[in-house]
Image (cartoon, rainbow, N blue to C red):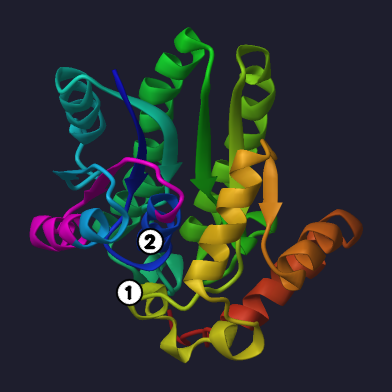
């Protein structure tokens, strides 16, 4: 049975960077994203450049049955997912009550539910086979509460905690679980989340997606439970254990920088 690395959110940002890093190291890939045309273009490019097998699956992972459909498709094709990269996710920069509920729900469905379900399905196979690796993309946001990005910060806290717990549960089965925690990264995230009017991308160092993916790859292959990318993420991890939570959430409120609306 052919072994693959499966990457979600693979058509841009950190996901595409991961695809290139794994391809350059000879891994055959299953790339998952919504844009089928973009997936096919990336497939042709990576196959030609690195001589690897690249399979694609177009899906909106916010759909209730999408993870199971992906899992069953992979099984039907006779592919074995040896490495799972749960990368897909998005944020929203606004007061919780000023955002559309459906956007909040989609964020929870993608950032938490789809990631957890895919981990359950493919991680269960890894446990049975007693081999495999899982990387879940968390964030600097996972270390504290985040006013004006409350659902996103909470979702990334879940990802980090969930990943750390599974890293211990799966250790006896020779399956590693890694949470990658980068700060702001130069992708389309800023625009999609509506962060143009925040201080985040002005005050914090903005990392290169390729460098983040390389650090994630190295940490994953070493079996590390947590990968802090960049000095500010390492500092945030330390400070979150030292300072009271009232301090860290007020700091996050300042960095997120959303002005409160009056008269509500």
Give above or below for 62 relative to 140: above
Write the residue at 52% across / 60% down: 213
Question: Up-down: is 204 above or below 46?
Answer: below
Disc 1 and disc 2: Cα gap in Å? Answer: 8 Å
Q: Is 14 placed left or right of 66 in the picture?
A: right
Q: Which residue is mark 2?
A: 90
Label annotation for residue 212: none
The answer to whether residue 180 is left or right of residue 100 is: right
Residue at 77% over, 65% down: 236
Instruction: Give, as a single range, the part of the protein colored magenta.
Output: 24-44
Q: Is residue 223 magenta?
A: no
Place of residue 17 in the rendered image (x, y in percent of width and height, measured from the top left) = 41, 63
Q: Are marks 1 and 2 in contact (CB under 8 Å)?
A: yes
Q: Picture coordinates of residue 5 (x, y %)?
A: 38, 38
Residue 62 point in image, percent of width and height: 25, 45
- Residue plotted at (64% across, 62% down): 140
- Residue 136, position as x, y percentages in the image: 51, 44
């Amino acid at each position: 049975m052919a072994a693959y690395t499966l990457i979600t959110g693979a058509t841009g940002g950190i996901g595409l960077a991961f695809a290139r890093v794994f391809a350059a190291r000879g891994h055959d890939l299953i790339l998952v994203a919504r844009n089928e045309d973009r997936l096919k273009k990336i497939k042709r490019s990576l196959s030609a450049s690195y001589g690897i097998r690249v399979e694609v699956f177009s899906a909106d992972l916010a759909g209730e049955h999408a993870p199971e459909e992906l899992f069953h498709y992979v099984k039907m094709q006779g592919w074995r997912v040896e490495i799972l990269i749960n990368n897909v996710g998005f944020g929203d920069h606004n007061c919780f009550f000023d955002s559309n509920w459906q956007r909040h729900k989609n964020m929870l469905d993608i950032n938490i539910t789809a990631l957890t379900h895919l981990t359950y399905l493919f991680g269960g196979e890894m446990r049975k086979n007693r081999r495999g690796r899982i990387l879940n993309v968390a964030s600097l946001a996972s270390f504290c509460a985040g006013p004006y990005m409350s659902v996103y910060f909470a979702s990334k806290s879940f990802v980090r905690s969930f990943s750390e717990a599974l890293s211990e549960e799966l250790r006896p089965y020779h399956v590693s679980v890694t949470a990658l925690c980068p700060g702001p990264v130069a992708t389309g995230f800023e625009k999609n989340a509506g962060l143009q009017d925040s201080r985040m991308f002005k005050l914090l160092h903005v990392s290169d997606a390729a460098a983040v993916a390389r650090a994630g790859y190295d940490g994953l292959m070493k079996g590390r439970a947590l990968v802090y990318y960049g000095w500010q993420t390492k500092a945030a991890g330390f400070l979150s254990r030292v300072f009271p939570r009232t301090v860290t959430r007020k700091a996050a409120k300042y960095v997120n920088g959303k002005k409160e609306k009056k008269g509500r």
